[in-house]
């Protein structure tokens, strides 16, 4: 398992993570074993947005013997009322629900205290100007939550979180289909028109990932498989099915992304996700699926897939493109982006313009021209 630094939290989290939301579907012992199996496979980050006592107890029991080896994303504002999950900022419910989480997870702390599920501007404004956010800060100051995070499906809210200065990481919904949709305050209606052709990565989303990279705000990913729809040709908005390693690779090649939190029912599903770590480039290759999908238009945009390699002079084309896009999204090139670029073993100025890469790019990116522009931007 590879581990990535989760932005300014400095936590080293496994690329493949654990999204806890299906745990309550199974007998307790089954789910406890599932988490232990994931731990043995090297997974060290788990999300607990769930408010139900059963899910929380399962996680607490599964990690009790190795609490210090897990990073728990615990949500503040996910409450259990009359046997049902309710998202709220009402402190009458928020405080006891978080205390319940703390007690059931164990250890006396939560690694990543998540401002839970903010998708609308109204909710963001409400959260940021209320007792709720004071409570979040109080938990942080006391060390009860070690870091502050936020979960959202809306890139506009995520942007405000990244710019806030105090939110250190974001749990965000990423997959190739969501990435082609404009921001929405309602995730449930994002794909109401399945038959509409998808039209390239949404600029606001691309800019968000770049901003997070620049601000050192790490991203963990939810909905990486779009609830399984992207694994099924009939349900996929592309009209084509991806594999688990391809979808993991898609998310993990977005700037600032550190871990994809997958839901599991069985140990075999854990093994399939973890097989990403040893998968070949061909097995991870999501680009060929997108490029040959009946419903898409991704022309001219770099997805950082790496499909264009090898380059005869050993330029890491995807990385150069990533830094170029990151720099081009800013008014002036930041020193940190320039430093990252200059640390590359081979710079864009080494490009000999052979264009052999362009015939391999499934999205028709004018790579040689971009290498010239990158060299001008970073090296002159
Ligand atoms: S230039 Fe094309 S093939 Fe290369 S990383 Fe970008 S999208 Fe992928
Ligand atoms: S055009 Fe430049 S970047 Fe592309 S393969 Fe040739 S040398 Fe490498």
Image (cartoon, rainbow, N blue to C red):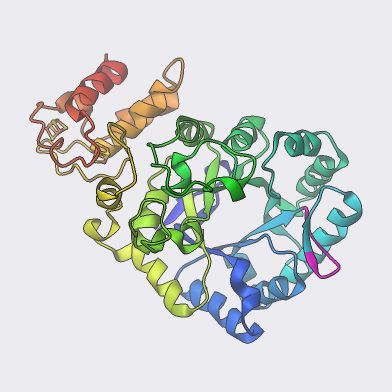
Q: Quadrant of residue 233?
A: bottom left
Near-viewer residue (304 or 345):
304
Near-viewer residue (33 or 239):
239
Counting from the top left corner in percent of width and height, residue 156 is at 60, 33
For the point 54% across and 32% down, the residue is 215
Q: Classify residue 121 as left or right of residue 177.
A: right
Quadrant occupied by the N terminus: bottom left
Near-viewer residue (272 or 3):
272
Residue 31 vertical placement versus 50 (above, below): below
Residue 1 in view of the camera: no
Residue 16 vertical placement versus 142 (above, below): below
Q: Image quadrant of ligand 1?
A: top left
For the point 49% across and 36% down, the residue is 205
Outermost residue toward the right? Answer: 92
Counting from the top left corner in percent of width and height, residue 353 is at 10, 26
Does the magenta segment cover residue 80?
yes
Residue 146 vertical placement versus 279 (above, below): above
Q: Quadrant of residue 101?
A: bottom right
Residue 201 in view of the camera: yes
For the point 82% across and 61% down, the residue is 97
Does the magenta segment cover residue 22?
no
Quadrant occupied by the C terminus: top left
Overall secondary structure of the magenta stretch?
Answer: strand
Magenta residues (range): 77-84
Counting from the top left corner in percent of width and height, residue 349 is at 18, 23
Q: Classify residue 133 as left or right of residue 14.
A: right
């Amino acid at each position: 398992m590879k581990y990535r630094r989760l932005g300014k939290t400095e936590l080293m989290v496994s690329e493949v993570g654990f999204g806890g939301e299906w745990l309550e579907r199974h007998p307790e012992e089954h789910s406890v074993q599932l988490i232990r199996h994931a731990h043995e496979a090297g997974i060290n980050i788990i999300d607990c947005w769930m408010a139900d006592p059963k899910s929380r107890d399962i996680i607490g029991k599964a990690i009790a013997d190795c609490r210090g080896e897990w990073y728990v994303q615990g949500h503040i504002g996910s409450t259990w009322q009359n046997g049902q999950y309710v998202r709220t900022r009402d402190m009458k419910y928020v405080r006891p629900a978080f205390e319940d989480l703390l007690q059931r997870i164990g250890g006396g702390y939560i690694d990543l205290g998540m401002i839970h599920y903010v998708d609308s501007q109204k909710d963001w404004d409400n959260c940021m100007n209320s007792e709720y956010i004071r409570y979040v800060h109080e938990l942080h100051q006391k060390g009860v939550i070690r870091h502050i995070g936020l979960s959202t499906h809306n890139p506009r809210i995520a942007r405000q979180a990244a710019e806030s200065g105090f939110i250190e990481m974001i749990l965000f919904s990423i997959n190739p289909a969501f990435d082609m949709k404009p921001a929405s305050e309602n995730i449930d209606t994002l794909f109401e028109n399945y038959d509409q052709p998808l039209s390239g990565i949404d600029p606001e989303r691309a800019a968000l990932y770049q901003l997070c990279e620049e601000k050192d705000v790490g991203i963990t990913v939810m909905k990486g498989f779009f609830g399984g729809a992207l694994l099924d040709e009939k349900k996929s908005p592309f009209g084509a099915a991806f594999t688990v390693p391809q979808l993991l690779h898609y998310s993990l090649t977005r700037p600032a992304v550190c871990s994809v939190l997958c839901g599991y029912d069985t140990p075999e599903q854990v093994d399939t996700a973890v097989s990403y770590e040893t998968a070949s480039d061909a097995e991870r290759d999501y680009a060929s699926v997108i490029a040959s999908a009946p419903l898409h238009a991704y022309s001219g945009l770099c997805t950082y897939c790496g499909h264009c390699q090898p380059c005869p002079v050993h330029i890491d084309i995807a990385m150069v493109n990533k830094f170029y896009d990151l720099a081009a999204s800013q008014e002036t090139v930041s020193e940190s982006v320039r430093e990252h670029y200059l640390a590359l073993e081979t710079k864009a100025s080494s490009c000999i313009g052979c264009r052999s890469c362009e015939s391999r790019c499934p999205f028709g990116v004018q790579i040689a021209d971009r290498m010239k522009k990158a060299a001008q931007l970073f090296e002159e």
